[in-house]
């Protein structure tokens, strides 16, 4: 290890110490069950953690590397089904989650290998293609119950907090990965690719393996989230976990929060997780209409999402003083 | 497979290719001029289908004629969408993240407006023509599909003529070929792009109207066709209009003949497999293959 990398490592440690917010948030969320909240609130937080995880995962590909994916439901669903199938054969949850990560990462290659070789819209197009294709296959596949879904039988008593902590741990893991990548050479390479692929290639960043790797990583995180969800829900079906709306939700959260940042997807995930409950309850038919309009408004007027908007407000406030 | 079976499969693939070409050509025009992947194409196809249905049910207009009538309506709608939304996107030489997300948001809006207006029941346009058949020797051809095919050919012919013999058509082609050179020679980009966008949406509506008389539809209609349109334009090389015709024919042939080996439920998986194959083997589409052959010759 040479001197400069030591310096960089020391700076990184210093940055972590000077950033207490994530640790405080984690501690608060971990201590929350002490207040004995209602099971419904715990469930809301549990699903929100899963959303936050997928949101950060999407942001690795869409935000850092600038590759829009409309097919994250594929990874979510693959993870859910992998965990479900393994747990029904008697595998423990944790190895099943690991297998979910692996299977989702493998599926990510099916899109990535053909589409990432090329520039242009191919990747975005291919993600829509595979999400439809996979859902059609899963709807017709007989050994997973096809369209009627698949039930998970766990021969253990149900503890809601166990699920709560597994989701919280997963979200924390996703945050650490996302924060580390943002400042590591890998993440800088991804941002270089987003800004200008030719220039990145000139500087020795080969876009193809970078994109493949980050896509597989994001897929693995999303797959575990799907697995954790499947274990909690105990019943999954293709129209749910592989559903188009799942992909829409996963894409929407980082866009709402602030694309390409570490905190944006977290913020977006929390806002979405809590607002989603209300919106779906009050406007079951049109919630996607609301999300679609929101997407258009954000793209046209505040591409930085909530975080970008807050930053602008903050700067304006400071500028006046 | 007997010769008769083979011929009737060929005929139905050809008839399918016609409508596939109409539904993809709008995307190609929009991509070529603006380098925007119109993800909302499916939403506009759905609107076209419902528009044709309303014209048919309320005014007893023949569905094929109704599909043609949707064209001007959708053209104006497309122009308006371009004026209000698409115009504000930054210009780029390849699809950008904002353009993809914007069109995606637009698709969600259209689709769910459809749910609000028409509900989520399956609808279909049924006329005496729907089940009638023309017999050519031993081969039976659905009259409706034949009519739709002829309508599709007429549209493509008109588009081709428009692109070649009008000033606006030439400026559209100029923008597709080289944006900067086109700007230097005085092509008004915003206006041309607006017309091209309207044209693309008009073709989406027309294709939707024609598809609506072939298949039943609901507000989610069009997603499967959107993927097929992607495969076709990638096969055709994204911004080549003649490539679209070839791409449509290839996809129609693959889909039609794959029914022999694979259950019909998996057809979308076939489309995707074809897309992946093309991306690996022939990234520039068939147009690049033709260009290479021309260079060699």
Image: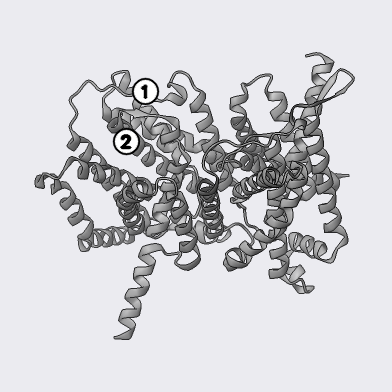
Element type at marker 2?
helix
Up-down: is A285 above or below A187? Answer: above
Residue B189 at x, y percent in the picture:
71, 69
* 1 or 2: tag closer to the N-terminus: 1
Q: Can residue B275 be seen in this view?
A: yes
Instruction: Between residue B108 and residue A132, name the one nearer to us.
Output: B108
Query: Label 1: chain?
Result: A
Q: Quadrant of residue B179?
A: bottom right
Residue A300 at x, y = what percent?
Answer: 50, 65
On screen, residue A186 versus residue A35, left or right, reads right
Farthest residue, direction bottom: A321
Residue A244, above or below A6 = above
Q: Position of residue A220 (x, y in %)?
A: 39, 39
Q: Mark 2 points at which residue?
A: A229
Q: In which quarter of the image is residue B122?
A: top right
Say which quadrant the N terminus of chain B sits in: top right
Instruction: Give the spatial CA distance, label 1 vs label 2.
Output: 14 Å
């Amino acid at each position: 290890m040479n001197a400069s990398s030591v310096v960089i490592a020391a700076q990184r440690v210093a940055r972590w110490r000077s950033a207490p917010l994530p640790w405080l948030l984690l501690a608060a969320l971990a201590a929350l069950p002490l207040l004995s909240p209602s099971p419904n609130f715990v469930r809301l937080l549990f699903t929100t953690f899963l959303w936050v995880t997928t949101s950060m995962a999407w942001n690795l590909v869409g935000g850092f590397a600038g590759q829009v994916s409309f097919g994250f439901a594929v990874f979510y669903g693959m993870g859910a089904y992998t965990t479900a199938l393994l747990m029904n054969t008697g595998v423990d949850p944790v190895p099943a989650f690991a297998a979910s990560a692996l299977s989702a990462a493998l599926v990510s290659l099916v899109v990535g290998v053909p589409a990432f070789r090329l520039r242009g819209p191919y990747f975005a197009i291919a993600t829509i293609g595979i999400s439809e294709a996979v859902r059609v296959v899963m709807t017709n596949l007989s050994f997973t119950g096809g369209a009627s879904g698949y039930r998970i039988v766990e021969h253990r008593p149900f503890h809601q907090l166990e699920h709560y902590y597994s989701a919280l741990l997963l979200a924390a893991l996703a945050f650490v990965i996302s924060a580390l990548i943002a400042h590591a050479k890998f993440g800088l390479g991804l941002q270089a690719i987003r800004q200008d692929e030719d220039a990145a290639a000139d500087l020795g960043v080969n876009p193809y393996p970078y994109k493949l790797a980050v896509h597989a990583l994001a897929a693995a995180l999303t797959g575990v989230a799907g697995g954790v969800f499947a274990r909690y829900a105990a019943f999954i079906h293709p129209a749910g976990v592989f559903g188009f709306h799942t992909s829409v939700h996963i894409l929407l959260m980082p866009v709402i929060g602030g694309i390409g940042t570490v905190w944006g997807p977290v913020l977006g995930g929390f806002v979405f997780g809590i607002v989603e409950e209300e919106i779906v309850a009050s406007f079951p038919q049109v919630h996607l209409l609301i999300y679609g309009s929101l997407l258009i408004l954000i793209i046209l007027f505040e591409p930085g999402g909530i975080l970008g908007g807050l930053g602008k407000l903050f700067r304006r406030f400071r500028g006046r003083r | 497979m007997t010769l008769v079976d083979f011929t009737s499969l060929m005929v139905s693939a050809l008839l399918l290719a016609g409508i596939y070409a109409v539904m993809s050509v709008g995307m190609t025009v929009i991509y070529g001029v603006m380098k925007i992947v119109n993800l909302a194409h499916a939403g506009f196809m759905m609107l076209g289908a419902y528009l044709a249905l309303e014209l048919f049910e309320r005014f007893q207009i023949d569905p094929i004629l109704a599909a043609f009538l949707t064209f001007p309506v959708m053209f104006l709608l497309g122009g308006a969408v371009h004026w209000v939304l698409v115009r504000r996107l930054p210009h780029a030489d390849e699809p950008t993240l904002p353009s993809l997300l914007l069109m995606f948001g637009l698709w969600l809006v259209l689709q769910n407006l459809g749910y609000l207006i028409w509900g989520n029941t399956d609808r279909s346009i049924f006329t005496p023509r729907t089940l009638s058949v023309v017999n050519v020797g031993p081969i039976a051809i659905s009259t409706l599909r034949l009519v739709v095919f002829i309508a599709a050919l007429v549209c493509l012919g008109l588009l081709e003529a428009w692109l070649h013999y009008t000033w606006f058509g030439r400026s559209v082609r100029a923008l597709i070929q080289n944006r900067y050179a086109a700007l230097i020679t005085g092509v008004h980009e915003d206006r041309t792009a607006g017309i091209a966008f309207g044209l693309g949406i008009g073709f989406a509506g027309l294709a939707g109207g024609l598809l609506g008389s072939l298949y039943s539809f609901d507000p989610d209609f069009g997603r499967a066709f959107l993927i097929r349109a992607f495969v076709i334009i990638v096969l055709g090389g994204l911004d080549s209009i003649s490539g679209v015709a070839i791409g449509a024919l290839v996809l129609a042939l693959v889909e039609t003949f794959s029914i022999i080996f694979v259950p019909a439920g998996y057809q979308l998986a076939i489309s995707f497999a074809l897309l992946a194959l093309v991306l690996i083997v022939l990234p520039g589409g068939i147009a690049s293959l033709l260009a290479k052959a021309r260079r060699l010759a």
